[in-house]
Amino acid sequence: MRKFAKVSDEEMKKTIQVATLMVHGTAVKSIQKSSPGESQIRYKPRRGVVAAKPGKAPNTDTGRLVQSIAFEFEDGGMKGLVGTNLRYGKHLEFGTNKMAARPWLKPAVRANRKKIEKLFEKTLADAVKRGT
């Protein structure tokens, strides 16, 4: 029984790593893919940008958000996290009282949900088949 638990932990960690990287990649790509929206002038430095429509992933402006999206593993690799340390990442994801949400993380999870479920199902099925 101990051997089974040990193998399962290692297999689960690998599956969690793959799932985490899938969500990370999808989140980054959603921001890098430009979507139509409203033209705006921003300052510091002064530049013209196209802000994504509310409800769509934000368009990249300076590239700072994309560069800040990171992943890490906790609980000995049994938990995968994806996110940003930039304050405005949260504002884009959920909106503010002055700006509608332009979510980028929750849609990345949703886009990969079925694939992730299949990964876990396969990992568990393989472990049971081998009986290790």
Image (tube, grey):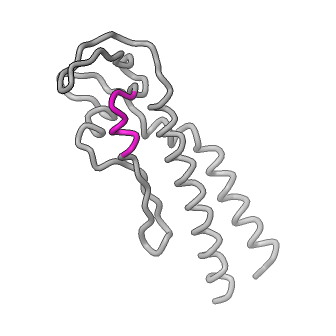
| Depth order, front residue of 93/129 | 93
Please, is residue 79 above or below residue 7 in the view?
A: above
Residue sticking out furthest to the bottom: 2
| Depth order, front residue of 112/33 | 33
Please, is residue 127 above or below residue 43 in the view?
A: below
Give the side of residue 44 with respect to residue 92, left or right.
Answer: left
Magenta-highlighted residues: 60-67
* Residue shown at 27% from the left, 12% from the top: 40
Q: In x, y percent, where is residue 7?
A: 66, 79
Q: Is residue 42 magenta?
A: no
Q: In x, y percent, where is residue 71?
A: 44, 56
Please, is residue 2 above or below residue 106 in the view?
A: below
Residue sticking out furthest to the front: 45
Q: In x, y percent, where is residue 33?
A: 50, 26
The quadrant of the image that shows the C terminus is bottom right
Q: Which image quadrant is residue 46 in?
A: top left
Q: Which image quadrant is residue 129 in?
A: bottom right
Residue sticking out furthest to the right: 129
Q: In x, y percent, where is residue 55?
A: 39, 22
The quadrant of the image that shows the N terminus is bottom right
Q: Which image quadrant is residue 5 in?
A: bottom right
Please, is residue 81 above or below residue 98 in the view?
A: below
Give the side of residue 32 with respect to residue 64, left or right.
Answer: right
Give the side of residue 9 with respect to residue 119, left or right.
Answer: left
* Residue shown at 47% from the left, 39% from the top: 28
* Residue shown at 42% from the left, 35% from the top: 104
Q: Is residue 65 magenta?
A: yes
* Residue shown at 69% from the left, 58% from the top: 121
